[in-house]
C-alpha cells in the first residue's frame, strides 16, 4: 500500500494535508504528539474519504521516539511504502531574544528543524530504493524574511529552507522532489490568539489563509503534475511579502 505521512496531522494545516492526501488516493499516517482525540478525528475524516488511515503517536523532536514508533511501523509494514512525507509539525514560542529561555530556543528548533531531520532520515532509504517520492516541508514567511519576536522560529524555518534546497539536489536523480511551503498567516490553533482584525491590514488580500488552501498546494506538490519542481520554496500568503 502507498502511504502519505503527515507529521502534526492531528490539527490545523496538517489535518487539511491528511485529507488532501486521501483525495490523491494515499493511505494516511497521521502523526501527533499529545492530542489523541484530534488525531483520531483526523483518522476518521480520512477514512470517510474511502482510504486507510492510522494515528502514529511520536514526538518528532525525539530521535528515539521516531526510531521506535515510526521505525517500528516501517518494520511491521515491509510491503508498504511511504511515498509522500509532509514535515508539518511545528510550534511557536514567541518572545524577544533578550528574554528568550534556552528551553524556548531548543523546543522550537528541535520540533521544526530537528523533527524534519529525524523523520526524513527514517523514511528516506526506502524512498530512495523505490526511486520515487515527495517530501514537503512546512516552513513559514518567518523563515524567509525573519520576524521580530520569532528569532527561534525564524531560525528553525530558515534552517528547513536550506535543508530543503540541499536535499533536493542530493536525491533529484532518484525522482524524489523536496519542496517547502511558506505560509503567511493561516487560521489555525497556532494563530488563534493573534489579533486577526489588526493583522489583516498588513495582508493585501485582507484576510488570513485557510488550512485547506495550504493543503491544495501540498496536494499539487505531492502529485505527479509537480514532477519537475524541486528545491523550491513556494509562498502562500495573500500577497504579504514584507
Ligand atoms: P497547529 O494548529 O498548532 O497544529 C500543530 C500540529 O503539530 C498539531 O498536530 C500538533 O500535534 C503537532 N505537533 C506539535 N509538536 C509536535 C511534536 N513535537 N511532534 C509531533 N507533532 C507535533 O499548527 P498549524 O498552524 O496547523 O501549523 C502547522 C505547520 O505550519 C507548523 O509547522 C507551522 O509552523 C506552520 N505554519 C503555520 C502558520 C499559521 O499561520 N498557522 C504560518 C506559517 C507556517 P498535537 O495535536 O498532538 O498537539
Image: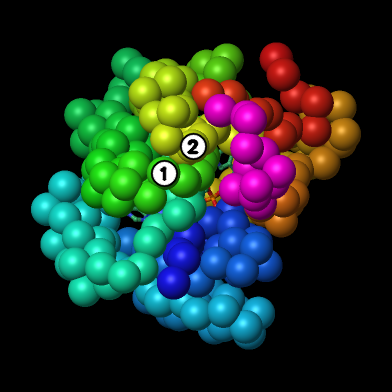
Q: Residues within 10 Å of mark 2 (few under 14, many from 20)?
A: some
Q: Secondary structure at mark 1?
A: loop
Q: Are marks 2 and 1 in contact (CB under 8 Å)?
A: yes
Q: Position of residue 186 (x, y in %)?
A: 67, 45
* Quadrant (top left/top right/bottom left/bottom right) for the C terminus: top right
Q: Label 2: which residue?
A: 175
The disc at residue 20 is none
Disc 1 within 8 angstroms of ligand 1 (CB): no
* Quadrant (top left/top right/bottom left/bottom right) for the N terminus: bottom left
Q: Is residue 227 magenta?
A: yes
Q: Is residue 232 magenta?
A: no
Q: Residue at x 30, y 26 (%)?
A: 100
Q: Residue at x 71, y 34 (%)?
A: 236
Q: Secondary structure at mark 2?
A: loop
Q: Residues within 10 Å of mark 1 (few under 14, many from 20)?
A: some
Distance between the Cα atoms at labels 2 and 1?
6 Å
Mark 2 / mark 1, whichever is N-terminal: 1
Would you say 211 lies left or right of 151 here?
A: right
Q: Residue at x 47, y 77 (%)?
A: 53
Q: Which residues are magenta?
A: 219-230
Q: Residue 156 versus residue 196: which sits nearer the camera?
A: 156
Q: Position of residue 138 (x, y in %)?
A: 51, 39
Q: Label 1: which residue?
A: 131
Q: Position of residue 163 (x, y in %)?
A: 38, 24
Q: Position of residue 126 (x, y in %)?
A: 30, 51
Q: Residue at x 86, y 36 (%)?
A: 206
Amino acid at each position: 500500500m502507498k502511504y502519505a505521512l503527515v507529521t502534526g496531522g492531528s490539527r490545523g494545516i496538517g489535518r487539511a494535508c491528511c485529507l488532501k492526501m486521501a483525495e490523491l488516493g494515499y493511505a494516511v499516517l497521521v502523526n501527533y504528539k499529545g492530542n489523541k482525540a484530534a488525531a483520531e478525528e483526523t483518522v476518521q475524516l480520512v477514512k470517510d474519504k474511502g482510504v486507510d488511515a492510522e494515528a502514529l503517536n511520536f514526538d518528532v523532536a525525539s530521535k528515539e521516539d521516531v526510531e521506535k514508533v515510526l521505525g517500528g511501523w516501517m518494520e511491521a509494514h515491509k510491503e508498504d511504502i511511504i511515498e509522500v512525507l509532509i514535515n508539518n509539525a511545528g510550534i511557536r514560542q514567541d518572545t524577544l531574544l533578550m528574554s528568550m529561555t534556552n528551553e524556548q530556543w531548543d523546543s522550537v528548533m528541535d520540533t521544526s528543524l530537528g523533527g524534519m531531520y529525524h523523520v526524513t532520515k527514517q523514511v528516506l532509504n526506502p524512498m530512495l530504493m523505490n526511486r520515487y517520492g515527495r517530501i514537503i516541508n512546512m516552513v513559514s514567511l518567518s523563515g524567509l524574511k525573519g520576524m521580530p519576536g520569532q528569532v527561534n522560529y525564524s531560525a528553525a524555518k530558515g534552517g528547513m529552507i536550506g535543508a530543503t534546497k540541499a536535499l533536493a539536489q542530493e536525491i533529484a536523480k532518484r525522482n524524489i522532489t523536496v519542496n517547502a511551503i511558506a505560509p503567511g498567516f493561516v487560521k489555525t490553533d497556532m494563530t488563534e490568539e493573534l489579533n486577526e482584525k489588526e493583522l489583516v491590514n498588513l495582508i493585501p488580500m485582507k484576510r488570513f489563509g485557510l488550512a485547506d488552501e495550504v493543503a491544495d498546494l501540498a496536494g499539487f506538490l505531492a502529485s505527479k503534475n509537480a514532477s519537475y519542481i524541486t528545491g523550491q520554496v513556494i509562498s502562500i500568503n495573500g500577497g504579504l511579502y514584507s
